[in-house]
Amino acid sequence: MNTEKLKYRGNENVIIKMMESEYMSIVVFDIGGSAVKYGLWENENLSNKASFTTPKSWNDMKEEMLGVYHSFSENYSIDGVAISAPGAVDAIEGTISGISAVPYLHYFPIKKEWEDLFGVPVSMENDANCAALAELWLGAAKDIQHALFIVIGSGIGGSVIIDRKLFKGKDLFGGEFGYMLLDGKHTLSEMGSPVHTAERYSKELGLDVVVDGKFLFQEADRGEPIAMKYVDGLIDALALGIYNLSVSFNPDMVVIGGGLSTRKDLIQRLNERAAFYLERQKAEDLKLVIEVCKFNNDANLIGAVAHFEQTVDYKKIG
């Protein structure tokens, strides 16, 4: 196998070099605040996709993940486990810092615990960076030099690509767009996430059960005025974030991922609202290009595989 290992810190070369000989079988996880998606990478294809609800504790998470791993290892010879995770992921040190929707993943040697749990090589990378890797490899940005990736989920994640290199920054906060303050008080993650927006909608209506983002958009689609107000606010927050990032980086393309990216009207609405801010600030010369990611909900899984195949050195591990 091609065992070239790329060193990761700050700028990262993300031009994909896949293993050149035999195909690998990799169990892939994408950890989110609401659900953990998983699948099997076999014969250069992603299959057996499913998910489970994100557990409430680290021990429960390990139990669920190990159960998934065993379900695959009974029928396949597994070469490794690739993980897409939230937070500031240090792929070298094997730790996760910052904040995320799954706080129990942070500030301990989590990669080593995963390797001890599965008994095979493990790679891990930030979820938004995984999405970027997938789209740079085979997706919307395969011919792009400079791009911003925005992943909309329980929070807002992102990646900065400069000269087809992943820029993570000194403290691994490059691309953590969700921290951006929109009004001096509320962040992009708070205002642009369907999860948090649905929580505010539920609170205003005095609902006993908090609805999810899917329900919120369904209500808005049928013309329910309060739901429409909250969805409009979410779109405005995302467009303002895109405007701020675009005038800072002037990318060739902004790629949108996450569950919300499957909505057919999303890109048009974001373009219209971002154009309003560009015109208002007399920045119309900036030609904004917003595209939806090619792989939609599979981007993080596919990107985790790309990261695994770039970074795992079988000569050292095997």
Image (tube, rainbow, N blue to C red):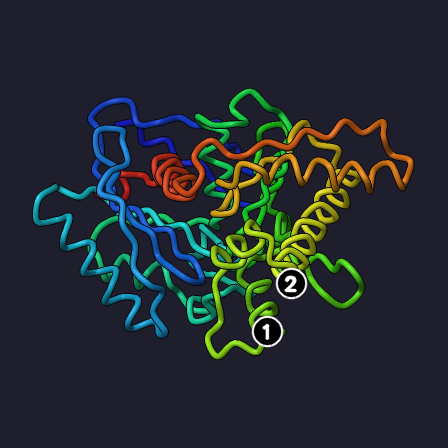
Which residue was labeled with disc 1? 205
29 with respect to 98 (left or right): left
Q: Which residue is mark 2?
A: 226
Q: Position of residue 252 (x, y in %)?
A: 68, 27
Local secondary structure at mark 1: helix
> Which residue occupies 50% across, 32% down?
14
Instruction: Please determine whether, in this image, residue 266 is positioned above or below residue 205.
Output: above
**In the rendered structure, which amino acid carries the disc numbered 2?**
Ile
Q: Are marks 1 and 2 in contact (CB under 8 Å)?
A: yes
Q: CA distance from mark 1 to mark 2?
A: 9 Å
**Residue depicted at 52% across the width and 32% down the height:** 13
Mark 1: amino acid: Leu
Left or right: 161, with 74 as reference point = right
Quadrant where the C terminus is found in the figure: top left
Can you tell which mark lies on residue 90?
A: none
Where 58 falls versus 302 (above or below)?
below
Residue found 64% across the figure and 55% down from its top: 228
145 or 270, which is in the foreground?
Answer: 270
**Extreme-left residue of the structure:** 74
